[in-house]
Structure formats: structure tokens, C-alpha cells
Amino acid sequence: MSGIFSVKAQDDDRQTRYYRELLRKAAKKGGELFGPIPEGVRREFFCLNAHTWIWHEEWTDAQGERHIVTTRYDVRPNGVLKAQDGQPYRFIELQEAKHLYKAARIYHHYVQNELTAKH
Amino acid sequence: MGNLMDIFRGGHEFSEAAEKFLQQDSEAMYVLTDTLNKNFGAEVLHQAGLPDMDASIPDYLIPGMPVSERPQHEVHDVIAAPGIAAVNETVETPDALRQTTEGEQHEYANVIGFPQQGSQLAVNAVVDPLQPGAMQNDMELAG
């Protein structure tokens, strides 16, 4: 019996690693939706789960200091809550909602296209 | 464009992971669309430049997508509305993470790997999105 469980655990582990790799690659591609990424900048945009979208940005300023900003959009029934470094939660306004939807829609299109066309 | 499949190594594990990924992505899109429609109306959903779901995706720049030549951290007009968000806040440790639950922090570290040195965020275990709590000390993901 333990052999069966061991094989199952290995399968689950492999599946988990594939899932993470998919998420990483999608996040990287998601970061490119906003245009060319300047050298030294790391940008990622991705769907973390059914209710959360993440925009992550890292860059080095002219003084050589590294900065990291993570923006999280929590989708709730009564609106989309935005959490950003050092700022309180707030609901996004119309213009930001439009941009978020556009980015999410393009990201979604990319993911669907990639995984259904060749999967 | 097709680098999502670069990780394909055959086997049902990949198929199942891809299936879950697709399912979650679709659910997230449905939830977002539904919420935005209820709170802002159809104006949000019907915008120029949105990809046709049946068309192959063009290069990463979609017509109508807001694009700026400025560094991304100065771009308020991509997602954040102009004048509302200071996207270029200079904070060493993402405060947003401190506002989240420990489990959520682990999820982030799992995906995008925040630098741990000098950070107040200490990730000692990683909660896997598929198997919560199943993996411990998976620090190579957060390096």
C-alpha cells in the first residue's frame, strides 16, 4: 500500500511543480502586457486565485536603491479592493477598473490560447 | 509567445496542472467580470482594444492598450488611475504583505519570490496552491 501512496505523492508533487511553473511563466508574460519592460525592471501581472490579481514591480532607482511594489486587487461582490504598499485598502474607481479589466482580459486570452491550443 | 508550453514534459501531471490552471483563470475572469459589471456597468466590459476571444492573440501590445515609454513604476495610467495611486512609493518591504494573512504571504512568495534579505517578511514554509500546507521550507522559490 505504501508504494501506491508514494507514487501518488510523487504525481502530486510533479503536478504542483508544473502548476507553479505555469503560474510563473504566465506572470512574466502578464508583465509584458503593459509594454516593453525597461532593463533592470522586473514586472509581473497575474491571477493568483479566483479572487485575487497581483501586479508586482521591482526596479533600481538612480541612486542604486532597489524598490519593490506589490499591488493586490481583491475582487469582492461589492467592488474591487486595492492593497498597495504602505497604503490602506480602498475600492478602485472606474478608470482603474477599466484598465484592470483590460489587462485581465488580455492575460486571460493569452492563458486560454496557450493552454487550450496545444494542450 | 508560446512559452507556457515550454515546460511541457509529458504525462498526466502536466495535463492536470494545466487543467486546474485554466479552470482557476476562467473562474477568476468570471468573478472579475461579474463584479465589475455589477459595480460599474457595461462601460467597463466593452472597451476598444479588448481581444476577441476567438482570435489568436497578437503580439503583446494590443491596440488600445495603454502604453507608456516611462518606466513602469512611474506609470499611473496603466492600471492605476492618474492622480490616485502613487505607484512609485519607495517602500523596502511590501506593506501590502503585512496586511495579508500569513497564508497569503506564502502564496505570494511561492509565485514571485520576494527577496528575503533585509525584509521583515519571513517565510518559513510555503503553502502550495494545490496542496495547502503540504510543502515546507521551499525557499528556492523565494530566492
Image (tube, coloured by chain):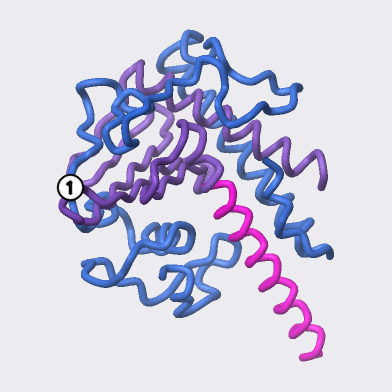
Secondary structure found at label 1: loop
The residue positioned 56% from the left and 15% from the top of the image is B49
Is residue A79 something that shows in the picture? no
Based on the picture, tell me whether residue A16 belongs to the magenta stretch: yes
Q: Quadrant of residue B93?
A: bottom left
Q: Residue B117: where, in percent of width, then height?
A: 27, 72
**Along the line of sight, which residue is nearer the eye, B121 or B2?**
B2
The residue positioned 23% from the left and 46% from the top of the image is A85
Residue that badge 1 annotates: B90
Label 1 crowding class (10 Å Cα cut-off): few <14, some 14-19, many 20+?
some
Range covered by the magenta-colored residues: A1-27
The residue positioned 21% from the left and 25% from the top of the image is B84
Taking the image as shown, residue B65 lies to the left or right of residue A58, namely right
**Along the line of sight, which residue is nearer the eye, A3 or A83?**
A83
The residue positioned 38% from the left and 46% from the top of the image is A56
Taking the image as shown, residue B72 lies to the left or right of residue B23, namely left
**Magenta part, dominant SS:** helix
